Image (cartoon, grey):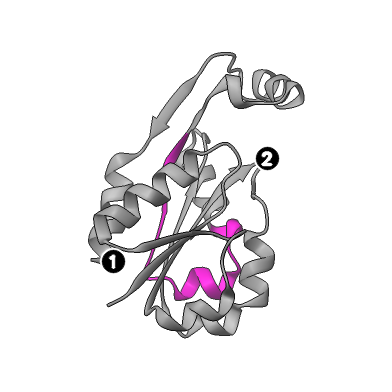
Amino acid sequence: MKTAVLYTSKHGTTYSIAKHISMALSADVFSLNELEVDSLSHYETIILGTPIYAGKSYGNMDLFCRDNLDTLLAKRIALFASGLTASKRKQQRQLQTAYLKPLYNHSSIAVFVGGAINISKLTLVEKLLTKTRLKVDADVTDIDQPAIELLIAAVA
């Protein structure tokens, strides 16, 4: 069964998680920015990953899902979202709103995988927002490895 991991990433955490998943599953991995949509026909399973910023999915994930909803709904789908939301309830809500409802409902698994902040990669505005909203002014890593392994096991 051929699998592709498609992701958006701003500072690299979601890319690192997508790469880990792709290696564990011997899957192809693509940034949505480099993906040729026609190539999706070659895959039976699609794993989508997006970071959460200010409670919403990042980049063009939402537009990609809207534009390709019929194609995605014809595939086996797994979803993940990354971020540093502490509350499990908020994580679940952000995961559900990161993807279109029909896609979320169609997915075989959807997991929130935690996240990381590398302060040196942030812009000045991002540093200020991170300090005021998250009360973080140093690097933080809070990756939920068991959630990642659960997704891998569900897709394998």
The picture places residue 13, in percent across and down from the top left corner, at 48, 38
For the residue marked with disc 1, what is the amino acid?
Val
Q: Residues within 10 Å of mark 2 (few under 14, many from 20)?
A: few
The picture places residue 3, in percent across and down from the top left corner, at 35, 70
Viewed as shown, does residue 131 lie left or right of 88? Answer: right
**Residue 112 in view (yes/no):** no
Which quadrant would residue 138 be assigned to in this image?
Answer: top right
For the residue marked with disc 2, what is the amino acid?
Ala
Name the residue nearer the viewer: 5 or 114.
Answer: 5
**Above or below: residue 132 compared with residue 62:** above
Which quadrant would residue 5 be assigned to in this image?
Answer: bottom left
Q: Which mark is nearer the camera, 2 or 1?
A: 1
Give yes or no for contact between labels 2 and 1 (Cβ–Cβ under 8 Å): no
Residue at label 1? 155
Tell me the residue at 43%/26% (across/down): 141
Question: Magenta includes 98?
Answer: yes
| First of labels 2, 1 by sequence position | 2
Q: CA distance from mark 2 to mark 1?
A: 29 Å
Residue at label 2? 54
Viewed as shown, does residue 51 lie left or right of 54? Answer: left
**Above or below: residue 7 compared with residue 132:** below
Give residue 49's mark.
none
Name the residue nearer the viewer: 116 or 150.
Answer: 116
Question: Magenta includes 32?
Answer: no
What is the secondary structure assignment of the residue under circle 2? loop
The picture places residue 38, in percent across and down from the top left corner, at 55, 81
**Residue 130 in view (yes/no):** yes
Where the N terminus falls, by quadrant?
bottom left
The picture places residue 14, in percent across and down from the top left corner, at 48, 45
Name the residue nearer the viewer: 66 or 30.
Answer: 30
What is the secondary structure assignment of the residue under circle 1? helix
The magenta segment = 96-115
